[in-house]
Image (cartoon, helix red, strand yellow):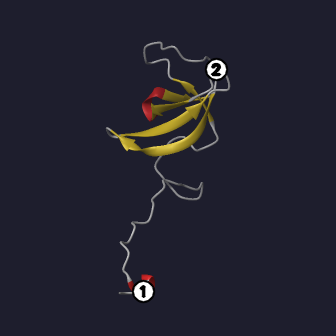
Amino acid sequence: MPSPKSVPTPRQAPSRRFTMTEDEPSGHGFPTGHEVLLSRRYPPRKAAPGPYKVIAQLPARNGQFQYRIKSGCEPFFRTIAESEIERI
């Protein structure tokens, strides 16, 4: 009977996390930590008024970069396309 040390175990793929530092160029128009507003070009939605903070830059979806944003008036994060936010 083989010892437990000699029994091969299946290899696990390394976990991948999407991380980005501010030194890495990403192509995103809004850096993490900056404040933005929801664009007035889009129909009104039930959203907190005022500034939102960019929490994370996300990969592109349907040809647009995505962002995770957070308002101090809401207990949750929003994921939004780059065309739906504007600079303050």
Residue 17 horizontal/vertical position (percent): 48, 55
Residue 80 horizontal/vertical position (percent): 46, 31
User: Mark 2 belongs to which amino acid?
Assistant: Gly
Horizontal side of 66 relative to 55 (left or right) equals left
Q: Residues within 10 Å of mark 2 (few under 14, many from 20)?
A: few
Horizontal side of 77 relative to 73 (left or right) equals left
Horizontal side of 77 relative to 82 (left or right) equals right
Quarter assignment of residue 87: top right
Q: Tag on residue 68? A: none
Question: Considering depth in this image, is 29 or 80 the residue closer to the camera?
Answer: 80
Q: Secondary structure at mark 2?
A: loop
Residue 66 horizontal/vertical position (percent): 44, 38
Residue at left offset 40%, top offset 67%? 12
Residue under circle 2?
Answer: 50
Residue at left offset 60%, top offset 54%? 22
In the depicted structure, whether residue 58 falls above or below residue 8 = above
Q: Secondary structure at mark 1?
A: loop
User: Mark 1 belongs to which amino acid?
Assistant: Ser
Question: Considering depth in this image, is 69 or 17 the residue closer to the camera?
Answer: 17
The quarter of the rendered structure image containing the C terminus is top right
Horizontal side of 7 relative to 75 (left or right) equals left
Residue under circle 1?
Answer: 3
Residue at left offset 45%, top offset 34%? 82
Q: Earlier in the sequence, mark 1 or mark 2?
A: 1
